[in-house]
Amino acid sequence: MLGSKPRVHLYILPCASQQVSTMGDRGTSNHSEMTDFILAGFRVRPELHILLFLLFLFVYAVILLGNVGMMTIIMTDPRLNTPMYFFLGNLSFIDLFYSSVIAPKAMINFWSENKSISFAGCVAQLFLFALFIVTEGFLLAAMAYDRFIAICNPLLYSVQMSTRLCTQLVAGSYFCGCISSVIQTSMTFTLSFCASRAVDHFYCDSRPLQRLSCSDLFIHRMISFSLSCIIILPTIIVIIVSYMYIVSTVLKIHSTEGRKKAFSTCSSHLGVVSVLYGAVFFMYLTPDRFPELSKVASLCYSLVTPMLNPLIYSLRNKDVQEALKKFLEKKNIIL
């Protein structure tokens, strides 16, 4: 009616209708009202949903306990007031929040008949997950640089790894994550969705959403590939070069005990890097015709990695173990 305010909706047309539409209609292909997506999740029998729910619940509980515990220990123990633990505290924060973007909604959908997620919720989920996962990649590169300085230039460590530099490295990681997330999210949700509203995944990710689009994806994929190269290559190069220098320096140490101590400070970080990048590469190298394999890989870096990170650092780090024991004794949990 005249005078009424225009209403904005997300629209979808079936692909069959799209084929018979005119070129003019194609530019405005979103003409069938749709305000949400459906998260299809895992293709398993309904009776297995309870098992998946319990598995997700257990993993998420361990993530909460491990990462909140790690942050608490680092903030309360003065001995852990070093650059390495400053980065580790931020790593725990990132792991906690990007798993929280995924796990609660996935667990709700195991029980719900209506597995829908609103358009705004889908945008927010993709944006936040991309923000934190990219930030973690850059943060791991900063942690590799920190280990390089600690082992290769130990006398200058406190000078070079100043509080200001550490803060700048963490802030830069978040900035790169935010820029990347804005680009990826805006590209994804400017596509014309016309195939279906059922996302073949357990959360909103760019690749499953692309499968719903009738837009020409060539430019979109080229930009996504370029963005991935800009994100992954520099971080991988920093990590590899840092560890090349670290290995070269450690091999020059004559003392077996000294070598063991030097490698022990890096083994935890290498474990975390291997798990994260291994899962990411596996997911993005998996062809689209194997969506279930992509879901397994996504599960590894969205939930398994945040669960393992605090365990890896606590089980292999004497400083963390001593700080944990001291914290528990202070709380009268251990007498």
Image: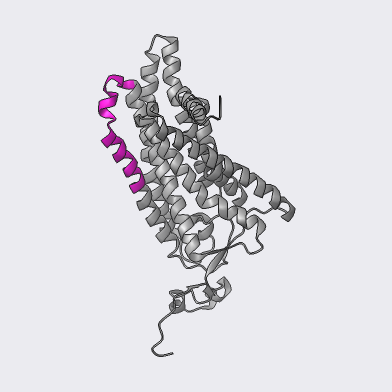
**Position of residue 326 measured from the top left corner of the image (x, y, whole percent):** 48, 26
The number of discs equals 0
Snapshot quadrant of residue 40: bottom right
Task: Give the vertical position of 49 relative to 145 (above or below).
Answer: below
Q: Position of residue 98 (x, y in %)?
A: 48, 48
**Main secondary structure found in the magenta portion:** helix
| Left or right side of 80 for 55 | right
- Residue 190 horizontal side relative to residue 99, left or right: left
Name above or below for residue 229 compared with residue 199: above
Residue 161 lies in the magenta stretch: yes
From the viewer's side, name the closer residue of 58 and 41: 58
In the image, is 241 to the left or to the right of 193? left
Above or below: residue 195 compared with residue 288: below
Locate residue 255, reporting x and y percent. 41, 9
Pick the residue in front: 217 or 9. Answer: 9
Look at the image and give the residue range highlighted in magenta: 152-175
Picture residue at 44% right of the left edge, 75% below the top? 8
- Looking at the image, which residue is at 53% across and 51% down? 102
Q: Residue furthest top?
A: 254
Q: Could you tell me which quadrant the C terminus lies in?
A: top right
Q: Is residue 39 left or right of residue 232?
A: right
Residue 236 seen in this snapshot: no
- Residue at 59%, 57% (x, y): give it: 200
In the picture, the quarter occupied by the N terminus is bottom left
Q: Nearer the viewer, residue 212 or 98?
A: 98
